[in-house]
Image (tube, grey):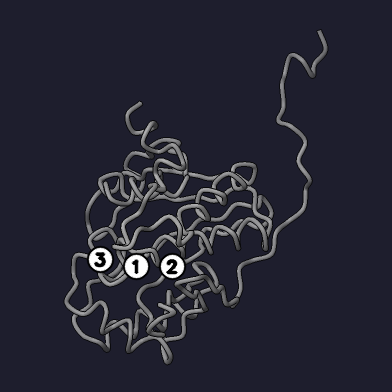
Amino acid sequence: MSAKKDRPVGVAVEARGAPKPGPVRLVGQYVIAEKLDPARHGTDLWAALEGRDEVWDYMGQGPFADEAAFRAFLEERAGSADPFAYAVIDKASGKAQGIVTLMEIRPGARVIEIGNIVYSPALQRTRNATEIQYLMARYVFEDLGYRRYEWKCNALNAPSRRAARRFGFTYEGTFRQHMIIKGRNRDTAWFAMLDNEWPGRRAAFERWLSPENFDDKGEQRESLSALNGADAEERG
């Protein structure tokens, strides 16, 4: 038996790097993503998040005592290359409603994570909230050419775990005692989506986001969880 059969190795992969994320403007039907700019987005974001301390429960930062502290956080976040932050802007109002970042960027392996997601109550559980995930995933896979797209969250954060499955990420395991956040233990649940899975995920996003998927009251006809098979996975 040859050494190759005795010691299996992974399949051959094109050994090229991927570009790092940059200050693009991603425009959807309902939402726009653009590089976070405290001068442009800070007032809207503070108005959307002020007093909403629960938004920061599972975050490494926040809540913030006042607008000055919040703006200092925005300045730090906007100046970082990793995580690279984008403001989430409602097209109808033109107002920023949240922040998402691309982070843990490994261009050589073509691996990247979406994280540090801050959704104001105005953004939560809306079509905007789903479309921003579609726009970011499309940017990562189609424009930048990454192979692996990760989602990690506190294992106790049940809404984030449900969201990951709903968006088409696959649960891969839990890293125990992975971090200390705000003086508390964090076990981290890991999810990922692969480039060869993206065409199916893209089709599910686009089918869900289609105006035809919503009735006259704005209620969905098909759930994204069902389109991505997450309901069956949850039952399993």
Residue holding disc 2: 100
Which one is in front, 233 or 172?
233
Query: Alpha carbon of mark 2 to alpha carbon of mark 3: how far?
Result: 13 Å
Q: Position of residue 182 (x, y in %)?
A: 24, 60
Q: Which mark is residue 118?
A: 1
- Name the residue located 42 percent from the left edge and 60 percent from the top edge: 130
Tag in front: 2 or 3: 2
Q: Amino acid at mark 3?
A: Trp
Dot 3, how many residues are within 10 Å of its Cα: few (below 14), some (14-19), or many (20+)?
Answer: some
Q: Amino acid at mark 2?
A: Val
Q: Quadrant of residue 64?
A: bottom left
Which one is in front, 182 or 28?
28
Give the mark nearest the N terminus, 2 or 1.
2
Residue holding disc 3: 56
Q: Marks 2 and 1: CB-CB under 8 Å?
A: yes
- Name the residue located 28 percent from the left edge and 57 percent from the top edge: 181
**Residue at far top of view:** 1
- 155 left or right, relative to 35: left
Q: Position of residue 72 (x, y in %)?
A: 34, 84
Give the mark nearest the N terminus, 2 or 3.
3
Which one is in front, 56 or 139?
139
Query: Alpha carbon of mark 2 to alpha carbon of mark 1: how far?
Result: 6 Å
Tag in front: 1 or 3: 1
